[in-house]
């Protein structure tokens, strides 16, 4: 039954609970061992000086806590029995001590964990776990896995810390509570605090970024006007370029229209010149009979001169001063003068005709030059040249018409002169007949005088 009760008692222990404690030369104890205090131990009662505080300090030191937690000093040498002045049974000074604590199933199911710390007056510590050498840091990490934290007043509250515990801030008390509960609550809480701090920083950064964004948006609104002006400027440049191209196109269209007009004027003037050339040919064709008539007039004049000389010789031979001969001589003289005037007028009109031919040739040359200029360039010069050529052609046409009229007049005068010459010849023949009759009469009436 005692063994069954012991097993039931052991089953009542939680993992990490204190199952055994042993002090050697620790504070008020030369040697003390407490085995199986029970799973419900949470209070030590005893008279003053009975070593209650020594047990509490031994728990704290043996579980990796700091001596300052117990308000018993801050150096481990203060835990040596007699503070280094006490002697053992052999009379030797006690200069070192130790604390050993056994934790229920600290190393696993059915395996308790034994933690031992040896210390001396030189404040040197030596830690062991399950008899193997270790370090205070490794011990604390192992005990942390067993959810043992002697720094947490909810788990370990020394007598001298009771007053301070009542003054803890709610936030700190919450942290100690979470540490006592374990299961990562304190880590989650600290992570939450860290996240809240980061969130606060992020909110501050967000507020800063929002202010910067607002400033940039305001600046952007100001710059947007410049951008709009720049875009309008670019559109204006593009429109100017387009209008420049359109201007060139319009200039090309205008030049093409002007060129077409020049070509049309050229074709028109060319047709007019062809008409004038045909008219010139026709007038030259008409002048040909006039030239032939003039030549006949010259021949007639030569014949008249021969007859005149012959008649003059006959007059001299006759020696008479008869009225008929004088009258014939006078008529012949007038005819000669008229013929001379006709010849002079013919020569003058012939010169005018040559001048008109030269002007017509110049007009045709000017028109040819206008044609070549119109084929090589655009502008007003071809039109002006064509206008000048047109004026020259018109002047030539007028002069040619005048020459034609003069030729007609000359032809009429030549025919009149020819008639006068014929009359003069008839008169000369009549005079010859009178002289012969006179000579016949003289020879009849006075043969001696006739001889």
Image (cartoon, rainbow, N blue to C red):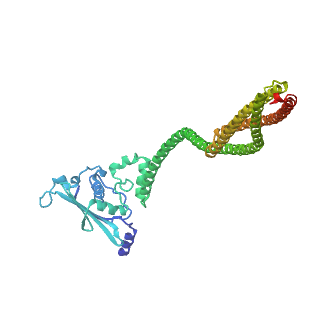
Marks counted in the figure total 0
Looking at the rendered image, the quarter that the N terminus falls into is: bottom left
Q: Taking 319 as reference, is 42 left or right? A: left
Residue lying at the far front in this picture: please name it: 448
Q: Nearer the viewer, residue 144 or 199?
A: 199
Looking at the rendered image, the quarter that the C terminus falls into is: top right
Q: Nearer the viewer, residue 71 or 333?
A: 333
Residue lying at the far left in this picture: please name it: 91
Say whether residue 44 is visible.
Answer: yes
Q: Is residue 383 above or below residue 5?
A: above
Q: Is residue 32 above or below residue 302?
A: below
Quarter of the view holding residue 447: top right
Q: Nearer the viewer, residue 171 or 33?
A: 171
In the image, residue 99 lies at what x, y percent? 25, 61
In the image, residue 105 lies at what x, y percent? 35, 69
Q: Taking 280 as reference, is 112 left or right? A: left
At 36% across and 65% down in the image, what residue appears? 16
Say whether residue 30 is visible.
Answer: no
Quarter of the view holding residue 289: top right
Q: Is residue 87 above or below residue 215?
A: below
In the image, residue 322 lies at what x, y percent? 83, 24
In the image, residue 248 lies at what x, y percent? 62, 44
Q: Nearer the viewer, residue 96 or 195?
A: 195
């Amino acid at each position: 039954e005692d063994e069954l009760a012991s097993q039931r008692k052991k089953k009542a222990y939680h993992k990490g609970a204190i199952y055994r404690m042993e002090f050697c030369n620790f504070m008020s104890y030369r040697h003390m061992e407490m085995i199986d205090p029970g799973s419900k131990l949470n209070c030590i009662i005893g008279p003053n000086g009975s070593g209650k505080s020594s047990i509490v300090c031994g728990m704290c030191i043996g579980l990796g806590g700091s001596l300052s937690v117990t308000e018993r000093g801050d150096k481990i040498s203060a835990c040596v029995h007699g503070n280094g002045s006490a002697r053992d049974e052999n009379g030797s000074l006690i200069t070192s001590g130790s604390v050993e604590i056994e934790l229920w199933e600290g190393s696993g199911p059915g395996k308790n964990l034994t933690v031992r710390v040896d210390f001396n007056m030189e404040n040197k510590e030596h830690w062991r776990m399950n008899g193997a050498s270790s370090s205070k840091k490794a011990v604390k990490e192992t005990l942390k896995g067993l959810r043992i934290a002697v720094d947490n007043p909810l788990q370990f509250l020394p007598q001298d810390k009771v007053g301070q515990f009542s003054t803890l801030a709610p936030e700190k008390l919450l942290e100690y509570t979470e540490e006592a509960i374990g299961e990562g609550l304190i880590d989650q809480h600290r992570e939450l605090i860290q996240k809240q701090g980061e969130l606060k920083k992020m909110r501050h950064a967000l507020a800063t970024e929002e202010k910067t964004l607002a400033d940039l948006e305001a600046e952007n609104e100001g710059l947007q006007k410049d951008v709009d002006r720049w875009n309008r400027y670019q559109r204006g440049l593009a429109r100017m370029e387009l209008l420049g191209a359109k201007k060139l196109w319009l200039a090309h269209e205008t030049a093409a229209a002007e060129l077409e007009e020049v070509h049309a004027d050229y074709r028109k003037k060319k047709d007019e010149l062809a008409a004038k050339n045909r008219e010139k040919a026709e007038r030259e064709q008409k002048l040909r009979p006039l030239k032939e008539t003039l030549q006949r007039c010259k021949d007639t004049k030569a014949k008249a001169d021969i007859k005149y000389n012959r008649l003059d010789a006959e007059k001299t031979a006759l020696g008479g001063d008869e009225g008929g001969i004088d009258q014939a001589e006078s008529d012949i003289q007038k005819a000669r003068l008229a013929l001379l005037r006709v010849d002079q007028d013919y020569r003058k009109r012939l010169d005018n005709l040559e001048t008109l031919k030269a002007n017509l040739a110049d007009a045709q040359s000017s028109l040819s030059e206008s044609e070549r200029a119109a084929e090589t360039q655009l502008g007003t010069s071809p039109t002006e040249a064509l206008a000048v050529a047109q004026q020259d052609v018109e002047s030539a046409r007028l002069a040619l018409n005048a020459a034609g009229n003069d030729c007609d007049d000359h032809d009429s005068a030549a025919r009149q002169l020819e008639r006068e010459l014929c009359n003069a010849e008839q008169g000369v023949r009549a005079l010859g007949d009178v002289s012969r009759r006179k000579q016949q009469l003289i020879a009849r009436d006075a043969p001696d005088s006739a001889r």
